[in-house]
Image: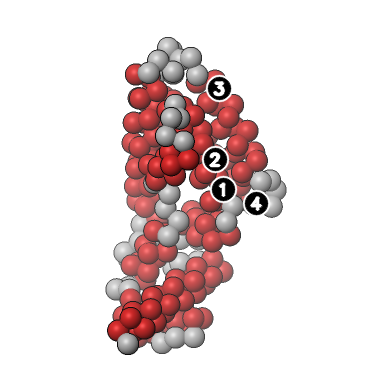
Amino acid sequence: MARKTKAEAAATREALLEAAEEVFFAKGVARTSLEQIARHAGLTRGAVYWHFKNKGDLFMALVEQVRMPFQSLMDEVGKADAELSPLEAIRLACHAGLVRLEQPSYQRILSILLHRCEFFSDINPLDMQEKIGNECFDEMLNVFTLAQEQQLLREDLSPEIATRLMQSMLGGLFHDWLRNPEAFSIRERGGELIDTSIRMMHR
């Protein structure tokens, strides 16, 4: 019985997250109430508070579902080939990230964070974006530094600049795509830009 109760609680939490994703995307975070989310999920407001402290806590849980720490992408490609060079690992990790971005849920939630989330009470979207960006920068910098130590990075390019170039390129691509996801495939266009960037950085 306990196992069933735990499974039911997990299903309720998932239903609330799915409802929040849909309502936040349609109305924006600030204009959405917990009552609306509960109603959309076919649940009570009490069910929301059982799983989440407040709207900010619910929103953070939603964003956590689509966070892609760069190191986790590196680990993913490393499982397939442990002998990858640092630059090739960066290239494949970025490709793996683009594949995830084309999943509808990733697209909607990140669009909410960037375009449908205003400052209010316990949510600061810019702080969240800054934290995610800094985490990615630090993890990518570690790999570019390793590439420099192995004399794979061109001599006139520091690991810091290489990281900023890659992050800026991907960020611009991402924002362009989110404005109109139907305009192009981020996996195809992004793949070309990633491959070209890595070739240009190679010694």
Q: Outermost residue, top direction?
A: 155
Q: Amino acid at mark 3?
A: Arg
> Do tag 4 and tag 1 residues touch (Cβ < 8 Å)?
no
Q: Amino acid at mark 2?
A: His
Q: Amino acid at mark 1?
A: Val
- The answer to whether 22 appears left or right of 188 in the picture is left
Q: Residue 203: x percent and y percent?
A: 48, 14
| Residue 180: assigned label | 4
> Do tag 2 and tag 1 residues touch (Cβ < 8 Å)?
yes
| Residue 199: assigned label | 3
> Do tag 2 and tag 3 residues touch (Cβ < 8 Å)?
no
Which mark lies nearer to you, 3 or 4?
3
Q: Residue at x 69, y 52 (%)?
A: 182
Secondary structure under tag 2 reads helix
Q: Amino acid at mark 4?
A: Asn
Which mark lies nearer to you, 4 or 1?
1
Badge 1 is on which residue?
99
Q: Residue 167: x percent and y percent?
A: 46, 35
- The answer to whether 49 appears left or right of 197 in the picture is left
